[in-house]
Amino acid sequence: MESKKKLAKPSKIKVSKKDNEDIKKLAQRIKTIRKSLGYTNADFFAYENEITRSQYARYETGEDIRFSSLMKLIRAFKMTPEEFFKEGF
């Protein structure tokens, strides 16, 4: 009889207060850029850039974001990472 090993659940990484502040700043930067591009409606921006509305809403409300998703947003803003991060960070 084969023994079955239990797989440990991955533990969640705790976000420090400083990291949380940075995530909030990132969310505000995303929202500010979207509005500066003339998109008063976040849903319309998400739709035009093939991002689900619910996922985009999470970006603007300060949920953590994957690097690949952030890069997709930066490209949708027609910016370089340097341009994106030059203000507010």
Image: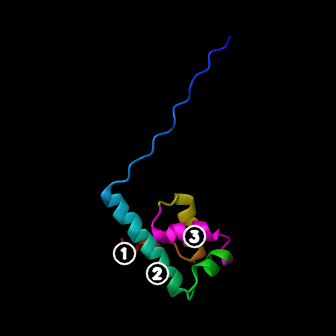
Q: Nearer the viewer, mark 2 or mark 3?
A: 3
Q: Earlier in the sequence, mark 1 or mark 2?
A: 2
Mark 2 touches mark 3? (CB < 8 Å): no
Which residue in the protein does label 3 denote? 56
What residue sits 58% from the left and 84% below the top? 41
Q: Nearer the viewer, mark 3 or mark 1?
A: 3
State which tag comes first along the sequence, 3 or 1.
3
**What residue does disc 2 label?**
32
- Assess whether mark 2 and mark 1 are in contact (beta carbons under 8 angstroms): yes
Residue at the image point whose x is 55% and y is 71% from the top: 57
Identify which amino acid the numbered label 3 is placed on: Tyr
Q: Quadrant of residue 21?
A: bottom left
Residue 65, how many percent across, how many down?
50, 61
* Residue in front for this viewpoint, 5 or 27: 5
Q: Earlier in the sequence, mark 2 or mark 3?
A: 2
* Distance from Cα at disc 3 to Cα at disc 1: 20 Å
Tag 1 residue: 88
Measured in 3D between alpha carbons, the distance from the residue under mark 2 to the one under mark 3, in whole angstroms, is 14 Å
Pick the quarter of the image with the N terminus: top right
Quadrant placement of the C terminus: bottom left
The Cα atoms of the two marked residues, 1 and 2, are separated by 10 Å
| Residue 30 % position (x, y) | 48, 74
User: Which amino acid type corresponds to the residue marked 2 in the rendered image?
Assistant: Thr
